[in-house]
Image (tube, rainbow, N blue to C red):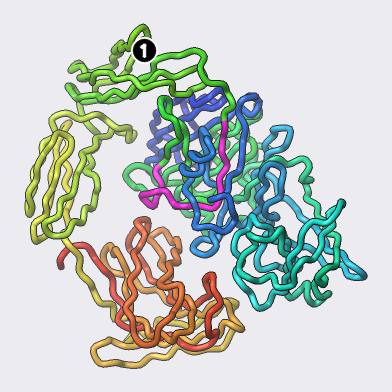
Amino acid sequence: MFTPPVALTPPVPFPLVIAQSSTREFVAPGVERSALRLRTNAGPLVIHIVAVDTHEPTARLGVVLAHDRLVSSGETVSSMAARTNAVAGVNADYFDIGNTNGPLNIVVQGGTLVRSPSSRVAFVVGKDRSVRFANVAFHGSVQYGAASVPLTGVNVWPPEGGASLMTPAYGPLKPNPTVAAVRVSPSGPNAQYRVTDAAAQTGTTENADATLAFGPAAAAIADPPPVGSTFDLRSTLDPPLEAIAEAAGGGPLLLADGQPVSDPNEPAPEERNVRFPVAGAGITPDGTLLLVAVDGRLPASSIGLTRPEFAALMQGLGATSAMAFDSGGSATLVARALGDDAPSVVNAPSDGVERPVADGVFVYSDAPLGPGPRLFARPAAALALPGAVLELRAAVIDAAGHRLRTVALPALSADPHIGEHREPVGAGDLRTTVQYRTVERLAALEIEPPRPNPEPGAVVELQAVGVDALGDPVALEGVQWSAAGGNLTPAGTAAVYRAGSADGQVLASAGGVRESIEVRVGHHEQALPLFDGDAAGGWRFTTAPSGAPGTLLFAGEAGAGGVLTLPFDLDSERAAYATGDFTLPGEPLAFGIDVLGDDSGVALRAAFVNRLGERHALTLVRSVDWDGWRRLVVALPPDLNPPVHLSALYVARLNQAPRRTTGSIGFRAPAVILAGNQ
């Protein structure tokens, strides 16, 4: 079973490790969780690991879809874990974010193919309980009469290159004028189907056994089979579906046979050398599965890893094969803590909150409830300033890690003597020990939230958090608070700040360290002169696919600072863009713009790039269902670390058929909303 290394030394290009600490905790038989804190020559890193002994008979793996369907609003990893009674889990595939939210690669659940594979690597669990990372190939055909049409997908909409079989697991279909579809149901043995209805594009598959859809390439070969006829549907996977229990997509492949791999099908290759939060899985020679998440976009605590650095980390952890999952704000690892009933998030998602995702890989324990009760108390190990109060949480747990009952224990006051301490605690005839270390000073003091932004007269709750040189938390005592520009009510390590009419400042000190934060009060709007003068020359018209005709138009309008008009023709293009590169001022909270609508029903989006070069596409409106000018405002996500760049305004289809596919949209008066009253 995996044990955190006493001295983690991953090979180059991983940063040089200067100092480190680790913790380890039992989750369930064959399942453990670990956390590593590193100080490197590139910056701090926090690494979270769930290790699974794949030979443990009571531990098993499963793939879960958000809300048990391919098309959904997305679901958090912790929600999927809780509703399926998992003990641990990690996010898996990349997904069609902001649109269908469906995973982009293979899904197999319980030996059933739910979605056919793409060209990217997949996490594959065999029916023999083995785990491997493989590219899965799919081949199929639809045969009826003299016709043989390639079946190129299962639950891929619209069909790509041939026909696709759509099952109820997909969810609502987005009507597509280029697709011919019929409803079908199984009829007899040997994968034979009968066509039951020709009118299949009603927006849903949920009331049908399945839908057979022909895209343009399939329709060029033959018309769909007529109502009442039967056809044979053949499909194969390599490796064969008969050998697969569960599968989920991801990528890229990081390691094979112990060596780094340059995956030719890696997603977003432009992000290869960008440090960001990462999630993935590795296999060690003894069959231990490592589910790994590394925090990122947190300069004070964890800078994240590039893909080559992530591969090197997997090598340093002992993995000989490894792959990545969707990362960035999607990277989420959950695990059950001793004394809890359900898993909780163990890493620090870079959005500040869990991001809903498409699917995940989960760990389940079938170990029986009850035997071997023992007392467990938190914190199992801690750091504290002299005299700090350690609040204890305790529970009676069994040998499998199930919570049998909670126990109330009195708080401990940290021994004033610097060094290691062990305090016996008990409940009834059960005993355990709380271990902690008293430290003299802090390495840093933080005030959370770091950038409070209350409205005038509103209150914000603040918390002082101390850490040591590796970023491990330290229990505090004797925090001194002061403030300017507002009213502050201290309460130990916490304080309540009531905002005045202007920006203020809060200062805290403890353990020989002082820290201050600015409290920005209220909001203000700052206009952006992007559509006239020199700025207008920075815009370009582009389309997807590229090369479609069109020209941006600019005009002046009294008091509006210029108008940009973007033409579109969604019959010949998927999207029409006005692209540029404009640095937004400050730390923007939101972006606002006036839009001249044409009641066409098209969707409008804006694309932003953060300081790490990562692109975020945000929906301004899903359907332009008005005529005339309307103000639109979209909140910017917290991981858009400034400086933020506006890179595009564009027209596209989003989950609906627009009323008109050609026209133009006008934009004026762009602005950002900033914290503070000036």
At horizontal 69% and vertical 74% (from top left) the residue drawn is: 179
At horizontal 37% and vertical 40% (from top left) the residue drawn is: 44
Residue 460 location in percent, x, y?
18, 49
At horizontal 23% and vertical 41% (from top left) the residue drawn is: 446
| Helix, strand or loop under label 1 | strand
Magenta residues span 348-364
Residue 245 location in percent, x, y?
70, 40
Which quadrant: the C terminus? bottom left
Count residues near mark 1 (Cα–Cα under 10 Å), then give few for <14, some for 14-19, many for 20+. Answer: some
- Indicate whether 548 appears above or below 654: below
Q: Is residue 419 left or right of residue 602?
A: left
Residue to which mark 1 is pinned:
432
Residue 247 location in percent, x, y?
66, 45
* Secondary structure mostly seen in the magenta stretch: loop
Residue 627 lies in what quarter of the image? bottom left
Toward the viewer: 520 or 406?
406
Q: Is residue 340 left or right of residue 315?
A: left
Does residue 356 appear anywhere in the picture?
yes
Q: Is residue 667 left or right of residue 150?
A: left
- Indicate whether 571 appears above or below 352: below
Magenta segment: does it hold 357? yes
Toward the viewer: 668 or 657?
657
Does residue 13 appear anywhere in the picture?
no
Magenta segment: does it hold 417? no
Badge 1 amino acid: Thr
